[in-house]
Image (spheres, helix red, strand yellow):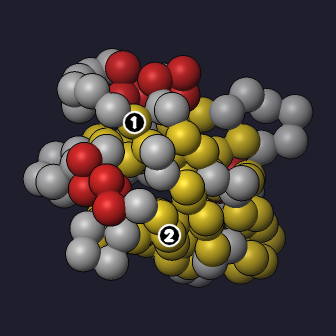
Amino acid sequence: QVQLVESGGGPVQTGGSLRLSCAASGRTFSSYHMGWFRQAPGKEREFVAAIRSRGDSTDYADSVKGRFTVSRDNAKLTLYLQMNSLKPEDTAVYSCAAANGFFAFPPRRRSGNYQYWGQGTQVTVSS
């Protein structure tokens, strides 16, 4: 089992940057594939990015590709999401999640395939 706590959210202007962190508890962090999801008010939760357990493979939603970078430091039990060139449509609650199993496409983009979730951190991009 793993517990996840996000941080790093907040208000930012269009074109700005933020780095989200997701701190994990438990020595098994390195065995989990990790994902970032977001949910805007009135919308369904959507996939943002994912990274394989060893950090050697990543995946991004088309809407963030080229602007966001997912990474992890297994020694520090931490997942990151570097967000650049932020847009108002990036405004949402961002949550990290952990999954067992294969880092397969498209399951890694489905929230139902993740077993553990953080509480989320709010990102608000103003124009």
The residue at which mark 2 appears reads as 23
User: Under tag 2, what secondary structure?
Assistant: strand
Q: How many marks?
A: 2
Horizontal and vertical percent for residue 49?
41, 46
Q: Nearer the viewer, residue 8 or 12?
A: 8
Q: Is residue 68 visible in this depiction of the protein? A: no
Residue at the location (63% across, 74% down)? 7
Q: Nearer the viewer, residue 23 or 16?
A: 23
Q: Nearer the viewer, residue 55 or 9?
A: 55
Q: Amino acid at mark 2?
A: Ala
User: Which label is found at residue 50?
Assistant: none
Q: Residue furthest left?
A: 56
Q: CA distance from mark 1 to mark 2?
A: 15 Å
Horizontal and vertical percent for residue 14?
67, 73
Position of residue 44 in the picture relative to residue 115 (left or right): right
- Please identify the quadrant where the C terminus is shown: bottom right
Image height check: is 23 above or below 35? below
* Mark 2 neighbour density, 10 Å: few (under 14) some (14–19) many (20 or more): many
Q: Is residue 93 visible in this depiction of the protein? A: yes
Q: Quadrant of residue 91?
A: bottom right
Position of residue 91 in the picture relative to residue 42 (left or right): left
Residue at the location (77% across, 44% down)? 40
The residue at which mark 1 appears reads as 99
Horizontal and vertical percent for residue 73?
27, 72
Residue at the location (55% across, 55% down)? 3
Position of residue 126 in the picture relative to residue 121 (left or right): right
